[in-house]
Image (tube, helix red, strand yellow):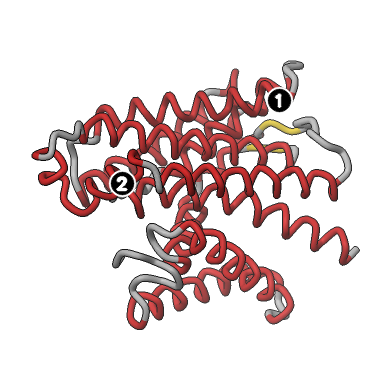
Amino acid sequence: MIHEYLISILTFISIYSIIVLSLNVVIGFTGLINLGHIVFVGIGAYASAILALNGVPWYISIFAAGILASVFGAAIAAITSRLKGDYLAMVTLGLVFIAVAVSRNWISLTRGALGLPGIPDIIKNNFHYMIFTMAISALSVFLFYRLTNSETGKIFQAIRDNEVAASVLGKNTYFYKIISMAASTFFAGIAGSLLAHHLNFVDPTIFELDFIVTMLVMLIAGGLASITGSVVGVFILYALSESIRFIVVNPSIVGAFREMVFAVVLILILIFRPRGMFGKVDI
């Protein structure tokens, strides 16, 4: 029983690492405050679930989930990348409410609040699926490391630090913002697909705001513009989250207590270590 519990924890950590890594590309490396990142995770989850339930092989479903999320991400970036700071944050946050409304009301596709049960397993053995998700997470770390240390990654960081200066130097900042968002949301879609196949179920609650808040706390704790920080932040915060189950006696207040702990952690980080554990820029 404990063995299966640990396998489940490591599987979730691997999936969440991909989400936080992809979020770090747009927020930490490019400076785009995307508060609607969970929308693209949900798009990937729903796309993969619908395809798999209709007999499409899992390897096509996962890739299609990433592509669809990336297309939506690039389209949103093309429309909103002229916005800056709080304005961009508010627009992307609005995507969450649109996604919830669509997923609840497009009954013929999503089954609304009933969700999509019976999503087939990619790998039936939980241990082997954990290894599979860890491998994809490790591949994501490698690819993001290569991306952020490439010329494209340096341009992302130049946009974050001073977009006007990057434009003066002849860089097409509009194009690179779209590239950043497309790359980020592709991996968000992949993570959503892995999550759907792990849970064997997806419903509109995947778009809940507490999910994106959790991802943001993990990102901030690990540090912006740090690949290592994203992984470490997820590991520590998820382990802390799970440990609360053994500390709080009343199961009905575990969720509320977890949110309180995350809020305290966030406040302490903002006060005493604004760059998080491994961050390279201030929050």
**Circle 2/circle 1 CB separation < 8 Å:** no
Pick the quarter of the image with the C terminus: bottom left
Give the tally of numbered discs.
2
Residue 9's spot in the image, x, y percent? 73, 60
Answer with the quarter of the image where residue 147 lies. top left
Q: As displayed, is residue 2 above or below residue 10?
A: below
Q: Which mark is residue 59?
A: 1
C-alpha distance separating marks 2 and 1: 32 Å
Identify which residue is drawn at 37% across, 48% down: 35
229 sits to left or right of 61: left
Q: Which mark is residue 154?
A: 2
Residue 155's spot in the image, x, y percent? 27, 42
Front: mark 2 or 1: 2
Amino acid carrying label 2: it is Lys
Identify which residue is drawn at 31% across, 64% down: 281
Pick the quarter of the image with the N terminus: bottom right
Q: As displayed, is residue 277 above or below residue 188?
A: below
Amino acid carrying label 1: it is Tyr
Residue 167's spot in the image, x, y percent? 13, 38
Q: As displayed, is residue 162 above or below residue 59?
A: below
Crowding near the residue tagged with mark 1, few <14, some 14–19, many ≥20 C-alpha atoms within 10 Å: few
